[in-house]
Image: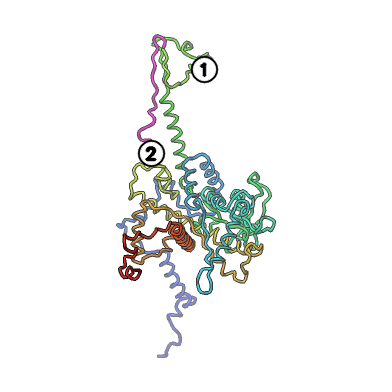
């Protein structure tokens, strides 16, 4: 039998066999993707996170993911306006702003120390004194501020206020030899002038959002300011390069361009609390007054003009004339009723017994949102003991120290190199040599610190740490906001002066005469001496 020269399996179907096999494999893959394996019908499917549950109870709990900049474009103007309104009229907001200024800046501001080192590692006291004295001269009122109205401490306190109230502070550095002896000053710009509504896109990738111009990397390259506050709703803008501006605010997202008021989470609570207190006060005043309703006798007419101090003629809906009874609510007043009339007292029952508890609960939420300790913010030391107030103070002080670090990095650290450059150019640092610039560019700004709740016990703990070598005298001084080198220098001067004064006092004391000798003997009482004299 002759052998077949063809493959019967390949010749049987019409078309390409390879193509048909490839189509069959692709169809199997599609079926596997489109028809995943189903779970058994008896298994109950339930969400693993309650925070992602959707229902009637979570209808107002939006889970939309929106960038912070988009939210700020829509709401920042309103938030800043409400924050300023609360700052004007709300006592607790006013207290929080003062707390922030006093805690971050304090009465003396950030202290400056310039530890200029010699080649042997010792501090050059002469160069250190020249730098610090020149900066103190620049810090005086009328020098550091372009308006001439602020000193360096006042300027720092105003920057803190702007950050807390408006969410941000904008500082422009001005270099002009005619402005002061250093040719360098700072200008504070109202954040409202940074146009909230200015938005633009450019072909090269630059964008403008809320008045801040950024490049493709999101780095600010310019700021667009309105000319004045009166033209905040429109007007001519001024473009200022970012190299001239320090924009200080708390960064909450990597791409965030504008700051948020520090009290934004507590605004509604504070506004509601203010309305509640106002209504409670009005109700208490009404309750303390002689208020009520006159009830006429049965079957009498509605004419009550005989009772009224002032009768107002009016007409009802049917056109009939009526007389409205008007009486003044005067506290401590008793009046005689006409025959047959009765009086029904109106008592709103205020102040209510739960008023204090409600206000405390609201202020606890406010203190949590602002980061301030409740006893200080609410002036409530009723239930405070040593342990609770110490714990609260330590936590709040950590909060303030974190904010101090943010201000030091955003304002003080970049300020010193620029001020040093202008100091050399203006000749205010003579006779320091410019060639040793790195020697002087070592400024340290130290924020204020706070006394302990129980100083005696805390000093005992510090003494134990020093005795066992856990800490150093310099570290303890820094914790209290002091410059160690300045403290050592003061101690050396005090010891030197004390030694000199003691020596002078000793010389001023009258000399005591020698003791009188006994009869027939010498004052020395030496018998050998007496025999020699004889």
Give the overall secondary structure of the magenta segment.
loop
Residue carrying label 2: 358
User: Which residue corresponds to mark 1?
Assistant: 316
Q: Is residue 49 above or below residue 128?
A: above
| Image mark count | 2
Question: Camera-side residue: 182 or 286?
Answer: 182
- Identify the image quadrant of residue 7: bottom left
Considering only order in the chain, which callout, 1 or 2, is on the residue closer to the N terminus?
A: 1
In magenta segment, residue 344: yes
Q: Residue at x 33, y 62 (%)?
A: 464
Q: Position of residue 157 (x, y in %)?
A: 53, 50
Measured as percent of width and height from the top left, residue 314 is found at: 53, 16
**Is 108 on the left or on the right of 43, as rendered?**
right
> Badge 1, how many Cα within 10 Å: few under 14, some, many 20+?
few
Q: What residue is rendered at 37% in x and 53% in y?
A: 455
Q: Could one spot residue 56 in this view of the protein? A: no
Which residue is farthest front?
534
Residue 293: x, y in percent?
Answer: 42, 19
Nearer-the-camera pick, 418 or 462: 462
Residue 504, given in percent of the width and then of the height, sits at: 47, 59
Q: Residues within 10 Å of mark 2 (few under 14, many from 20)?
A: few
- In the picture shown, does residue 459 fall above or below 358? below
* The magenta segment: 337-357
Q: Secondary structure at mark 2?
A: helix
Please tell me whether residue 207 belongs to the stretch shown in magenta. Answer: no
Q: CA distance from mark 2 to mark 1?
A: 43 Å
| Residue 453 or residue 313, whichever sits in front | 453
Rendered-image quadrant of the N terminus? bottom left
Q: Nearer the viewer, mark 2 or mark 1?
A: 2
């Amino acid at each position: 039998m002759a052998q077949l020269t063809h493959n019967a399996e390949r010749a049987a179907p019409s078309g390409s066999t390879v193509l048909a096999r490839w189509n069959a494999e692709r169809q199997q893959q599609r079926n596997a993707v489109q028809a995943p394996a189903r779970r058994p019908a008896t298994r109950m499917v339930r969400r693993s996170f309650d925070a992602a549950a959707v229902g009637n109870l979570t209808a107002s709990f939006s889970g939309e993911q929106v960038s912070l900049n988009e939210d700020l474009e829509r709401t920042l103007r309103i938030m800043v306006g409400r924050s300023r309104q609360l700052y004007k009229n709300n006592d607790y907001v006013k207290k929080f702003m003062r707390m922030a200024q006093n805690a971050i800046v304090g009465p003396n501001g950030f202290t400056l120390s310039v530890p200029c080192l010699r080649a042997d590692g010792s501090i050059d006291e002469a160069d250190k004194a020249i730098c610090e004295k020149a900066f103190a001269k620049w810090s005086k009122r009328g020098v550091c501020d372009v308006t001439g109205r602020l000193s360096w401490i006042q300027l720092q306190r105003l920057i803190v206020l702007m950050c807390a109230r408006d969410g941000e502070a904008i500082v422009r550095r001005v270099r002009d030899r005619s402005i002061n002896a250093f040719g360098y000053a700072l200008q504070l710009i109202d954040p409202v002038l940074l146009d909230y509504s200015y938005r633009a896109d450019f072909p090269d990738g630059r964008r403008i959002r809320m008045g801040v111009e950024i490049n493709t990397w999101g780095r600010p390259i310019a700021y667009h300011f309105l000319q004045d506050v009166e033209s905040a709703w429109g007007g001519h803008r001024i473009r200022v390069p970012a190299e001239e501006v320090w924009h200080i605010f708390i960064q909450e997202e990597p791409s965030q361009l504008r700051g948020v008021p520090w009290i934004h989470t507590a605004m509604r609570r504070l506004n509601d609390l203010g309305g509640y207190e106002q209504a409670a006060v009005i109700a208490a005043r009404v309750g303390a007054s002689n208020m009520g309703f006159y009830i006429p006798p049965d079957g009498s007419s509605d004419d009550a003009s005989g009772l009224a101090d002032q009768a107002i003629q009016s007409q009802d809906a049917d056109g009939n004339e009526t007389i409205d009874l008007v009486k003044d609510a005067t506290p401590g007043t008793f009046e005689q009723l006409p025959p047959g009339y009765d009086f029904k007292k109106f008592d709103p029952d205020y102040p209510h017994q739960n008023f204090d508890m409600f206000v405390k609960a609201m202020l606890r939420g406010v203190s949590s949102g602002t980061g301030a300790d409740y006893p200080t913010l609410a002036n409530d030391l009723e239930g405070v003991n040593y342990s609770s107030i110490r714990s609260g103070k330590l936590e709040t002080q950590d909060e303030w120290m974190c904010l101090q670090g943010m201000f030091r990095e955003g304002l003080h650290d970049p300020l010193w190199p620029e001020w040093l450059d202008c100091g050399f150019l203006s000749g205010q640092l003579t006779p320091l040599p410019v060639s040793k610039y790195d020697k002087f560019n070592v400024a340290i700004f130290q924020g204020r610190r706070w006394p302990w709740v129980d100083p005696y016990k805390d000093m005992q703990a510090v003494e134990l740490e020093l005795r066992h070598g856990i800490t150093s005298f310099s570290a303890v001084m820094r914790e209290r906001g002091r410059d160690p080198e300045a403290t050592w220098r003061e101690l050396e001067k005090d010891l030197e002066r004390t030694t000199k004064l003691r020596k002078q006092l000793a010389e001023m004391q009258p000399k005591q005469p020698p003791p009188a000798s006994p009869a027939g003997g010498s004052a020395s009482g030496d018998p050998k001496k007496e025999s020699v004299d004889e």
